[in-house]
Amino acid sequence: MGISLSELIKQNTLGQSEGYPDGVPHSYNWYKGWNPDGLLTPPADFTAVEGWAQVYTEEGAPASPNTNVEVANAKTYVHIKETGQWLLVQDQSQLGIAGGHFVTDFSGNSGYPMQVTTLASGAVSFDAPSTGYNDHFWYGARGTYAAGTVDGVYVQMDMRQTDPNANLVGMVGVDWWRNASAPYLDDHSNNPGVGGSNWVELSTQWKTIGYYSMSTAAFQANLPPPLLGSTQPPPVEAPDMVAPASPKIVAITPDAGTVGDQVTNAKQLTLSGTAEAGSTIKVFEGSTVIGTAKANASGTWSLTTAQLADGNHTFTATATNAAGNVSPQSASLAMRVDTLAPVAPSITAFTPDTGTVGDKVTNVSQLTLTGTAEAGSTVKVLEGTSVLGTTQANAAGAWSLTTAQLAVGNHAFTAMATDAAGNVGTKSNALNVTVSEPLISPPANGKNLLVNGSFETTDSSPLGEGRWGAYKSISGWTAISGGTIELWNNLNGVRASDGGNFGELDYLGARDGFYQDVKTVAGQVYQLSFDARSRPGFTGATCSIEVLWNDSVIATVPPGSNWTNYDFNVVGTGSNDRLTFREVASQGSDGLGALYDNIELTAATAAPTTPLPEIGDKNLLTNGSFESSSLAPGGWAGFDAIPGWHAISGGTIELWNNLNGVTASDGGNYGELDYLGARDGLYQDVKTVAGQQYALSFDARSRPGFSDSTCSVEVLWNGSVVGVVPPDADWKNYDFTVTGTGGQDRLTFREVANQGGDGLGALYDNVSLVAKQANPASASMLSSASQAVALMNQYTATDAITTGAVTSGPLATDTTTLLSQTLSLPAQH
């Protein structure tokens, strides 16, 4: 657009500024306009010039971050002193506009890039200055002239703002440059300033701002082309009638607690999203505008809310472009604000509680804690400040957690709950439990049949204290295929339980173990004992031991943190029987194994000359084949109780009849051990005679299509585990021996703890409990070693599992059937 000469002279007369730039020190010579004191003519060897402009927030007014500045028709002329002609050396339409947002006083030339957008009309647009910054812009290239030919310069630009409520002021100015490519130097020796106009207030209408370096009289005598009627009209733009697309709210932060669940404990949120570049975003909750933001040149925006109340909040947004067109409302995004911490959880019980129930004393070193908390909350169980583990409360608020192996002594357990929003509740009251010393079976008597049971002979140079060695074989022992025998001597703070050397079961990444073959007498019962402990700093989770007799697993030992003796009974076959110790398969990759020492195998009694006593006929259990409940073939049902049997706490008795291709082993009905997601089981109380031994027998098989990894059975006598049965795919009979207390003894069958969440359990049937009859051999044993037997009866039950069905006849003389006695773990009595 054009500018009158009188308006141009006003813009170049000091003191005629319409406003002043915010943030510029008043001592700066261009604070009120820069008319009189620049370098008005170029140095003799200079050959370039640069027109520029600045836009500031007007002093005393707030910044206007949601408006844009537009610039058009920028031109720079130099005056040729010999001819008096004005030469056009810079033209926006040819060179474009570039710039940056600098701090208002240019300290350190600090700033950030300016996004310049070219409009359809040829004008350019960029953001108005934000708080503490300006808009400083110039042509895309310098104008040039011949050295010594120029004595004046004139620059003018058309400017406007897009928001009528913005308060902006602008000025234009010029610098001489040594040449077209000379670098910027801090001392301005390469670009001395010429001067600049007064400050002009911008509006939504185009305004031309100009600056001339010559005196007003000389300038009036020789006007440049824009003032001689050859002005270029301002850009004409077609009206924008198209509404922008709906913006998007893509995220709300912070999303505390579980990310993505749209629940947070933060009361002030930041919403972010995308929209048409440069559009103004209004964010709503319902019909209420909670704030506005502006989409940047990349189309991204963000807005931080005020403090929000607890509860559900649903946000939407609209976008308004520069022409005032409003988009449709965006899709909603919701967030629930929850700043209320959950109530303290409770620890209501622990199991197993051996001995006197309720006295909070147990001799089991691994406990299961149960309690209540806010439904869905994460429960952290602590001892002191140490976290023992975390679990989640179910929809009913119930939770449970099984500890690692605990040391002997007093333990105070507490719990804390964290809700979905991340709020942490207060600590629960403590549950105090005393773990007592484990009861250990009496030591074996007689000669140790094993060679080098304490590992003192290595077949090579002896181990010194603090040393270790690795071997494929040592005296008496051979490493299993692919494994290595690793021995220590007073290493890592551990001394042997017998002698100087002891073993560590995991050498490197392979599955390690060792074995020894020993000549036995057919039918002879042998007592196997050994000492074990976990590696310092680790638990049974990586330090368990599998014990095998003739390649059949007879027990898995998760040792505690101190040396403890473990006892088993095995039966000889009359040939070379193989005793093997090895790692659990899943623990063979970390190089961290159990420690072991002092292995003995001794004959428990003389080789049997007469058969074991016959088992009595009368089944002391009621409804052992589960026929008292009426089920149609192909049917099933769940019960809290049936004749003779009761479900364990929280569990259900599930019965089948000819279902899923399985028929009962006895009668029509049989049980399935996992009803739904809880840990299921059943029990029956039976009157016994003190000291009487009873034969416990039952049939079991796995659920069709599943294995013992989800179908194992725990057998308990008076709350103590006497055996864990991993059944096969077909019905088999399993036998145990238990001893009566003279009161009401409780027989329990239940799922293994970690298998109770899938609804897939073992099948069972034909449960019987009959008294064993005394015979001369057993009477002789009692008379000759009554004290030892009485002590053993106090500490352990002789529990045997048969690998095949045994329905009648003497157990000990069946040499084709291996009896694998369940481990008398100290922690289980």
Image (cartoon, grey):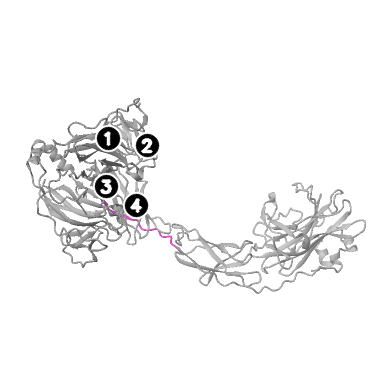
Q: Is 8 placed left or right of 494 in the picture?
A: right
> Would you call the spot at circle 4 few (<14 residues within 10 Å), some (14-19), or many (20 or more)?
many
Q: Earlier in the sequence, mark 4 or mark 2?
A: 4
**Residue segment shown in magenta:** 337-351
Q: CA distance from mark 4 to mark 2?
A: 38 Å
Relative image position of residue 11 (x, y in whole percent):
80, 63
Q: What amino acid is at disc 1?
A: Gln
- Camera-near label (1 vs 4) is 1
Q: CA distance from mark 3 to mark 4?
A: 14 Å
- Camera-near label (2 vs 3) is 2
- Camera-near label (2 vs 1) is 1
Q: Secondary structure at mark 2?
A: loop
Q: CA distance from mark 1 to mark 4?
A: 48 Å
> In this figure, which residue is indicated by the disc labeled 3?
433
Q: What amino acid is at disc 2?
A: Tyr
Q: Is residue 514 magenta?
A: no
Quarter of the figure that contains the N terminus: bottom right
Whether tag 3 and tag 4 are in contact, CB under 8 A, the answer is: no
> In this figure, which residue is indicated by the disc labeled 2?
507
- Camera-near label (1 vs 3) is 1
Q: Secondary structure at mark 3?
A: strand
> Any mark on residue 516, and which?
1
Q: Earlier in the sequence, mark 1 or mark 3?
A: 3
Q: CA distance from mark 2 to mark 3?
A: 36 Å
Relative image position of residue 374 (x, y in whole percent):
35, 59
Query: Residue, x 88% and y 54% (percent of image)?
Result: 150
Q: In the displayed structure, would residue 691 be above or below residue 6?
A: above
Whether tag 1 and tag 3 are in contact, CB under 8 A, the answer is: no
How many numbered marks have been drawn onto this rendered protein structure? 4
